[in-house]
Amino acid sequence: AYKRFSELLPKDERENGWSARVPKSQILTLPELRANPFQHRICRVFSTSDTRDDSMSFEDFLDMLSVFSDSATSDIKSHYAFRIFGEAGDRCYFDEDGTLGRKDLEQLVNCLTGQGEESRLSSEEMEQLIQNVRLVGRAGHCRAPGTDLSTLLPPQILEESDIDKDGTINLSEFQHVVSRSPDF
């Protein structure tokens, strides 16, 4: 892990690698993040930078690699997934209130389907998706134009996931849903 980290550092900083910070622009060159629609949010969640520039220390980098490794537990993965979806704030502008609400779900869908006008869901499609799709499942899959969204995923995002019926999904509710998903 340290070798990968030090290779991302500018050459003149490599000898001080243990105390150096890799700029976000370099972190985003990692193959694991290059095509990830949440790449900016992932950097925000794992960075401990006081300046909020999303740069990473070696410890931050190690945390990120550990969470994405096959050996990380489902609880650890779901904790960070929730932070990426609901708390990190950045590129997709989630509301950072510590829960996943309707607006967060809309932003999540927009991140997964693309930010361009040609790939953005219409208001009607978004409503159908929010009403008829479970939070965890095949949400990352692309849809073909004209596809009935309700056939892509099992039903009821908020209704099924919102155990305390407050209109949002908190961390424990998110982890409960994830625990029922063998693919997570």
Image (cartoon, rainbow, N blue to C red):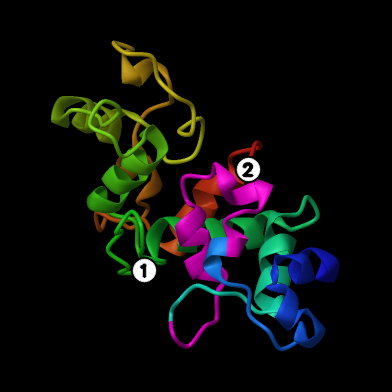
Q: Which residue shows up at 50% across the image and 46% down it?
A: 177
> Could you tell me how far apart the alpha carbons at marks 1 and 2 are, in whole angstroms?
21 Å
Q: Amino acid at mark 2?
A: Phe
93, 105: nearer the viewer:
93
Residue 182 at x, y percent in the picture: 66, 37
Tell me the crowding category of disc 1: few under 14, some 14 to 19, or many 20 or more residues within 10 angstroms, Cα based. Answer: some
Q: Which residue shows up at 66% across the image and 64% down it?
A: 64
**Left or right, residue 121 beside residue 51:** left
Q: Which mark is residue 184?
A: 2
48, 75: nearer the viewer:
48
Residue 158 falls in which quadrant of the image? Answer: top left
Residue 3 at x, y percent in the picture: 84, 67
Label 1 sits on residue: 98
Q: Which residue shows up at 47% across the image and 63% down it?
A: 83
Residue 110 belongs to magenta span: no
Residue 56 at x, y percent in the picture: 61, 75
Q: Mark 2 falls on what kind of element?
A: loop
- Residue at the far top: name it: 146
Q: Using the image, determine if residue 47 lies above or below residue 75.
A: below
Residue 50 belongs to magenta span: yes
**Left or right, residue 126 beside residue 10:** left
Q: Amino acid at mark 1?
A: Gly
83, 54: nearer the viewer:
54
For the C terminus, the image quarter is top right
For the N terminus, the image quarter is bottom right
Residue stretch in magenta: 26-51
Q: Using the image, determine if residue 3 lies above or below residue 58.
A: above
Tell me the crowding category of disc 2: few under 14, some 14 to 19, or many 20 or more residues within 10 angstroms, Cα based. Answer: few
Q: Which residue shows up at 59% across the image and 50% down it?
A: 33
Q: Can residue 118 be seen by looking at this rendering?
A: yes
Residue 173 at x, y percent in the picture: 45, 56
